[in-house]
Image: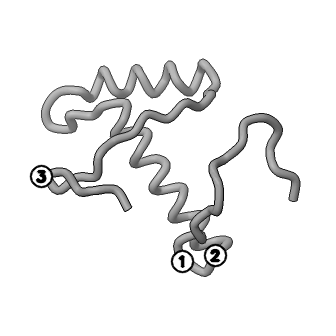
Amino acid sequence: MPRIAPTGELPKVRATLYLSAEVLNEARNAAVFLAGYPVRLTLTKLAEDALRKELRRLQDQYNGGREFPHRGEELRGGRPIAA
């Protein structure tokens, strides 16, 4: 479990992923437009909030609202896992 920073927040880690240029450009535009008061949006906050919202939806839809089980190993690059 990651240590909680003195500010009460979990530390951030770098993640590499691929997005369509259109989605990334729209997200960057939103982050710049909403960077000031009162929203103070960052690209990191936008991405984290969107992922959390989608994870909650997936948990509700596919796992009875519970957190998904912890994975036993790191994700592998390449083709998606077949169902």
Q: CA distance from mark 1 to mark 2?
A: 6 Å
Q: Is residue 50 above or below residue 8?
A: above
Q: Which mark is residue 1?
A: none
Q: Which mark is residue 6?
A: 3
Q: Is residue 77 above or below residue 29?
A: below
Q: Quadrant of the C terminus?
A: bottom right
Judged left or right of residue 16, residue 52 is: left
Mark earlier in primary sequence (1, 3): 3
Looking at this view, name the residue that lies furthest to the right. 82
Q: Residue 39: where, in percent of width, then height? A: 21, 38
- Count neighbours of disc 3 (C-alpha within 10 A) and say few if under 14, some if 14 to 19, many if 20 or more: few
Image quarter of residue 44:
top left
Q: Which mark is residue 66?
A: 1
Judged left or right of residue 10, residue 26 is: right
The amino acid beneath tag 3 is: Pro
Q: Is residue 10 above or below residue 43?
A: below
Q: Residue at x 54, y 77 (%)?
A: 66
Q: Residue at x 19, y 51 (%)?
A: 5
Q: CA distance from mark 1 to mark 3?
A: 28 Å
Q: Residue at x 45, y 55 (%)?
A: 52
Q: CA distance from mark 3 to mark 2?
A: 33 Å
Circle 2 SS class:
loop
Kindly report which numbered mark, 3 or 2, lies closer to the viewer in this rendering: 3
Q: Which mark is residue 63?
A: 2
Judged left or right of residue 14, residue 17 is: right
Verify CB contact (< 8 Å) between mark 3 and mark 2. no
**32 or 76: which is nearer to us?**
76
Image quarter of residue 16:
top right
Q: Is residue 2 above or below residue 50?
A: below
Verify CB contact (< 8 Å) between mark 1 and mark 3. no
Circle 1 SS class:
loop
